[in-house]
Image: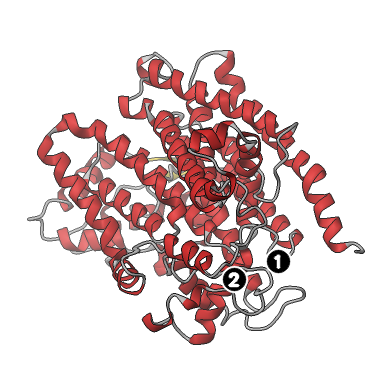
Amino acid sequence: MGSRNPHVSAGSVEDSDRPAIQHDGWLTGAIHAGARRHPYRLSHSRPVCREDPRRRHEDAAGDSNLLVRGHPDHRTHLQRLDRPVGGNHWRGPQLTAFFRRRPHLAWLIAFAALVAIVWLTATPFAWDNDEAAHYGTSRDIYEAGGLPGGDEFPEIILPGTPFEDAGLGKYHSLPPTYYAATALLFNLNPDAVGDYTPGLLAGRILSAVLYVLAVLLVYEFVRTLNGGRHLAAATTAAACALIPKMASIGGSFTADSFALAAVTFLALATVRAVQSRWTWRATFLVGLAAALVLMSRPSALPILFFPAIIFFFHLPSGLAGWLQRGILMAITTILPNSWWLVRNWRNLNGDLFGATTQVEYQYSLGLPYATDEVFLFKASETGHSSIPEMILKTDWLLRFNPRLWLSERYNDGSGLGMFLAAVFVALIVAALVIAIRGAGRSPGRALQPAQRFVPLALLVVFLIAAVMTANNNYVHGLYVIGRYAMPPAALLLAATVGMTSRLDSPLGRYAVPAVAIVMVAVHITFWTGFMLPDLLRQIGPA
């Protein structure tokens, strides 16, 4: 009898008791010997060997018996199953193998990271997205060592050094999660780095990471809707990454990057919940994603209507379960944000989200709000009697698409803006057709009713965001569109293209590459026609 192998638990068959195995070579024999000692380690391997088939059935039966709770070696066997390979916790080889099996995912990450790096290095400070206001808010928290106290409101939201001349306020009345997190980054970047003021580079890198994360979430979102077509999902996500406004957010020190990642996470969690028939775990994840949206920015709140609309389709499964899951989502959403909601309620006289205080307090002192167009559409200045009149009697619609897709800096309503308007009309038509007819009629391609209405629900969210934008224009004079409406517009683009690719027709085959080509052309046109001339004017002679 040979000595017992220490890796084999008590009661197991000893190596010496096994029948002889004829191997094809010394390497195959070594692999198979390792597999006999640790069968759970090489479960995916199939070494080339000639083994007695009766021994194989006996081994399988023995492993099955070990899984029975009453078996004396049950606990030891489970511990072996959970034991990491070789006791090594480093997951580098596994991660490399993961990306080797999914090269499109590795290329997507590299592509999104490259886009973000180009934007964060090419654009000067405060070029877009109210970057100076976001940066100033985080710097205040860093210098004070904590969030401002109640006695500092509302004066703390007023413009401060060095942005007084620009009239840029600060966002201390808004949800503080992003600003508290980025204030910590000043410890990693306390000194200026080249042209970047202290903390700016670290904050922009965080936005780039959140941008890449949002692109990956869009990839998973599309893959869930298009039947698991990985390459089509990656191409669609890359097309969304090329939306100039989205890339601009990824290269700026702004809470909009946090909102962008939270919005895409909520969209993905919702469609995954539909796929799993709203299990408790999926419902909890939807509530968690909604909590992240709530703690990002008030401008992201319209996306909360998306899970609300889709969840309505779960009602026929039973009223009691539907109410219980709805309560779980509400609790999961509100509870993590309760501390700052109560804080704002006390400090801002009941203004939970702080947006109204942020604007109206500055107006009460006669201060503009970070733009030369503050009174462009304001009713008290223009004399408009209603929002429809404001939209129909001005160039509001012509300015809308450039600000939605490109940047808040530009209002060009011809050329590229009109082309983007045509693209958006096509998305609206596609959303309506998918809701009515579905995407693919074969049993393997059939969609649940809730899945069919995903693009239409995103269109409703977009319209809600557009109405909020128009109301801000009419009441406050703020013509800010991208931060409200761009995320649902990007998700609408991703959903419609992804679901159209399910069709067994030329439209289904060419939808994804066509949209990718269009977005590449839009991005290049934006850089050559808008960005580069603008940047050259800023860095050139006066």
User: How many residues crowd around disc 1 within 10 Å: few (fewer than 14), some, or many (20 or more)?
Assistant: some
Compared across the picture, whether 38 is left or right of 281 comes to right
Q: Residue at x 57, y 35 (%)?
A: 236
Disc 1 and disc 2: Cα gap in Å? Answer: 10 Å
Question: Can you tell which quarter of the image residue 242 is in?
Answer: top right
Q: How is the image coloured?
A: secondary structure
**Position of 296 relative to 195 (above/below):** above
Where does the image place residue 45, in percent across and percent down from the top left?
A: 43, 45
Q: Is residue 26 visible?
A: no
Q: Residue at x 47, y 63 (%)?
A: 360
**For the residue marked with disc 1, what is the amino acid?**
Phe
Residue furthest front in the image: 383
Residue at image point 53% right, 70% down: 365
Rendering coords of residue 269 (x, y %): 36, 45
* Quarter of the image that includes the N terminus: bottom left
Read off the residue under disc 1: 125
User: Considering depth in this image, is 370 or 172 the residue closer to the camera?
Assistant: 370
User: Would you name the residue on which mark 2 appears?
Assistant: 135
Compared with residue 418, is residue 126 higher up or lower down, i.e. above or below? below
Residue drawn at x 48%, y 36% is 222
Determine if residue 37 is in view. Answer: yes
Q: Amino acid at mark 2?
A: Tyr
Quarter containing the C terminus: bottom right
Between 142 and 352, the residue placed more toward the observer is 352
